[in-house]
Image (cartoon, helix red, strand yellow):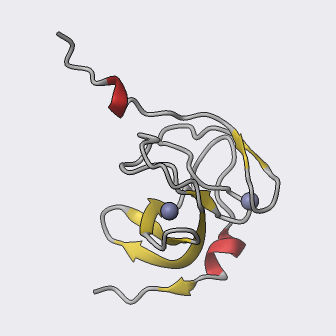
Amino acid sequence: MSLQNPRFRKINDSFVCENCGHKVPPAEKSCRDHCPKCLWGKHVDELPGDRNANCGGGLQPMRYELHSKKGTMIIFACVRCGVEKRNRFLDSDSFEPDSYDALLALTPQEPG
Ligand SMILES: [Zn+2]
Ligand SMILES: [Zn+2]
């Protein structure tokens, strides 16, 4: 019996952004799941990196939140099923950091 459940294996690979067509490199440390240029993601994860969601809809970046512990979080809404997702803004990724211009175009979330 293995303690490692392959269903929870994190997948960190490059992909082509379906919103802007940018070739997105894998992230250095965490799981790259959104485009660094336009910040759009894809609803493929239930938990970050598990690729267990069956939806496949586009995740539109809506708001951002300055979190004291986790750093800057982007809040997405799936255009297909409407679920809200949040992911960390990758400002120090060595392959390709996320665009601050794209982040600042979003609505800041009041800390609550
Ligand atoms: Zn993009
Ligand atoms: Zn969805």
Residue 67 point in image, percent of width and height = 36, 71
Q: Percent from the top left, x then y, of residue 35? A: 67, 56
Q: Position of residue 9 (x, y in %)?
A: 39, 29
In front of the other: 97 or 77:
77
- Asked if residue 77 is positioned above or below residue 71 in the image, the reply reads below
Q: Is residue 43 above or below residue 110?
A: above
Q: Nearer the viewer, residue 51 or 103?
A: 51
- On screen, residue 91 versus residue 18, left or right, reads left
In terms of image quarters, where does ligand 1 lie? Answer: bottom right
**Residue closest to the far top:** 1
Residue at 43 percent of width and 33 percent of height: 10
Q: How many marks?
A: 0
Q: Residue at (42%, 75%) from the top-left corner?
A: 66
Q: Is residue 73 above or below residue 90?
A: below
Tell me which corner region of the image, top left, top right, bottom left or bottom right, holds residue 14: top right
Residue 66 lies left or right of residue 99; in this view the side is left
> Which image quadrant is residue 34 in?
bottom right
Residue 13 placement (x, y as % from top left): 61, 34
Q: Quadrant of the N terminus?
A: top left
Query: Residue at 42% across / 43% down in the picture?
Result: 52
Residue 101 picture quarter: bottom right
Tell me which residue sits at (43%, 65%) in the image. 86
Q: Quadrant of the C terminus?
A: bottom left
Q: Is residue 111 left or right of residue 77?
A: left
